[in-house]
Image (tube, rainbow, N blue to C red):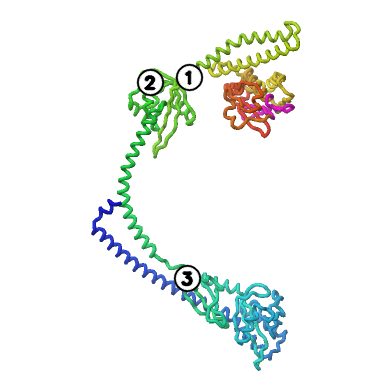
Amino acid sequence: MSGFFSALRYWHWLLLVVLAAVALMAIETLVKHEQQLNRSQQLRHEVASAGQLKAMLEAELNLPLYLTVGLASYVKASGGKVDKAELDILLPGLVQQAKHIRNIGVAPGNRLQYIYPLAGNERALNLYYPDLPDQWPVVAETIQSGQARLIGPVRLVQGGQAFIYRLPVFIPDDTYWGILSTVINIETIWSLLAASAAEQNVTIALRAKTPGQNEYGNSFFGEPRLFYDDSLLLNLAIRGADWQMAIRATEPVIDRSIWFRSALYLATLCLLTLFAWLFYSRQQLRQTASELSKNESYLRAVTDNVLDAIIVTNEQGIIEDANLSCYRLFDYPPGSLRGLHWSMLLATTESIEAIYSATSEPEQEFEGSGLRQDSSQFELSLSRTRLVLGQQHHQLLLIRDITGRKRIEKLKNDFVATVSHELRTPLTAINGALGLAIGGALGDLNRSAQKMLTMAHSSCGQLNQLINDLLDTERLASGKMRFDIKAVAVIPLLEQSITQIAAMQHKQQLVISCDEDKTYKVLADKGRLSQVCLNLLSNAVKFSPVDSTVEIRISEHNQMIRVSVIDQGVGVAGEFLPQLFQRFAQADNQDSRQHSGTGLGLAISKALIEQMAGQIGYQRYQAGSCFYFELPAATSGAG
């Protein structure tokens, strides 16, 4: 900021100060004039509205007093001797002349003996005022003054609040006769007053002066704050009361002084901030350029030292940038690939659309052959990610040389295949010899020898099954397994599988559940389908408790037949589900360790079902597991 202050000269500062002072004076003058104009208009509106509301309120409240005075004249004329029959005629007429009268009470000797209307006011009948500690002081003061008074709001004995005109009556010889009370409905008065104030767009408040004092009490209608701000105050001419009204327009005076001041301060602040920002931005730009250069160098050093090739292309596949590992991998000079299509680095015959489809998800890879500049080829894996930078779309390609990995996989597969084939022949001979020995070919054996040979024969069978699984895995991986697809009846095949694993059962009951009216046939290789069923059923029997039921459920939906094997075991742990159908995968829990197995059965079953255009999966039940597979249903003409 020091450069900004030093750039301005003295007369610049002086001109800015003079202009600011002139602007402030003009704004203050305009604001003051506007405030006076608005207030005068508002005051005229308040005066006009106050006259109408004052006249209405005085008329509504004075009328009941005049009627009460007329009733007092009747009492005086009769010498204090009132007739109930005459009151029954006189009081209804008085009540009908004023719409806000709730009731009129006649209290000779301070006891309410006549009330009209009586309905709803029965509790007040025969009320003796000296017995009311909350009302008697005011009544006594009214009697002593000899003048009518409007009291209220008062909480009535019969319920509710109201205003009460109380008029003490003295017969001609100045003897106190009693008191007349006219109860005025406060709710209707306030409703009428509020509606009239709303029509006039004003808000009002009322308060009364305390008798015998020169001070006003609390407000009993409206907001008390109106008596303490710049509101119009009027005294009301109501007989028997000293009321004051405060009135103010609903719409407040628009004060634009704050807006003018804020606008000037904001404009000045923006101007100063603009200059400061320009100088600050210049310095920040230099620092940002330096940091950007350092970050770019750091990022380039990291990407260039990554072993995998990293390529950035535009949406059309044209190479925009590549790391040094890419040039080393494909044996091109640095920078020579920019502007070329990345597909020139591939030696595979697949189309670009097929590669894009294979790498539609970031975690999916495409495996193929790469083409170096010298036309030599190598095995590679390619993954693709979409990038959006600003408004431009790019692609990030990650290419890895997998020649070594493929060589190791081939050596492993060849080793497994060789060992499996070499082991199979002697194992077959050993298994046959043990079977003959157990069957009695060597004569009678003692119990210990029979037991040992049986154990050896069982272990030999397990080893032979392991070799068969390894050979199936190798054939599936290499694509050498052949399938004879034809229509296969599902129920007989399942019944045969149940018979084959009967020796493995631990008193479990295997039940086939299906629609008896249907013949379920699928398109599959019968031998391979039997292998899948044996794998699923043997797993269900292994992991089911004793005396439980294994249900084999068959259903058909959308030209697909589903076979579900449902057991009552402990199920598969949630963390193991992603590896459930992988090779050599076994759940690492105590129950699984009690059962032998290679971990290849489910992987082989999955590969076999998928080769036959089906799918296999797992569902967890509340008690147990459900392994299922689906295969296309065979049409009636398939054979």
Q: Quadrant of residue 134?
A: bottom right
C-alpha gap between disc 3 and disc 2: 89 Å
Task: Please state if 56 lies on the left or on the right of 4 as rendered.
Answer: right
Asked if residue 552 is among those painted magenta in the image, a careful observer would answer yes
Q: In this rendering, does residue 54 appear at all?
A: yes
The local secondary structure at tag 3 comes to: strand
**Looking at the image, do the residues carrying marks 3 and 1 touch, with CB atoms under 8 Å apart?**
no
Give the residues in magenta. 541-568
Q: Position of residue 330 (x, y in %)?
A: 38, 22
Is 183 above or below relative to 533?
Answer: below
The amino acid beneath tag 3 is: Ala
Task: Provide the residue designation for mark 2.
Answer: 372
Task: Provide the residue designation for mark 1.
Answer: 406
Task: Please state if 126 lies on the left or on the right of 195 as rendered.
Answer: right
Q: Earlier in the sequence, mark 2 or mark 1?
A: 2
The amino acid beneath tag 2 is: Arg
- Which label sits on residue 249? 3
The structure residue drawn at horizontal position 37% and vertical position 69%, both measured from the top left corner, is 32
Task: Please state if 35 lies on the left or on the right of 542 as rendered.
Answer: left
Mark 2 vs mark 1: in front: 1
The local secondary structure at tag 1 comes to: helix
The structure residue drawn at horizontal position 35% and vertical position 58%, both measured from the top left corner, is 266
| In front of the other: 419 or 602 | 419
The structure residue drawn at horizontal position 39% and vertical position 63%, both measured from the top left corner, is 258
C-alpha gap between disc 2 and disc 1: 18 Å
Counting every numbered tag in the picture gives 3
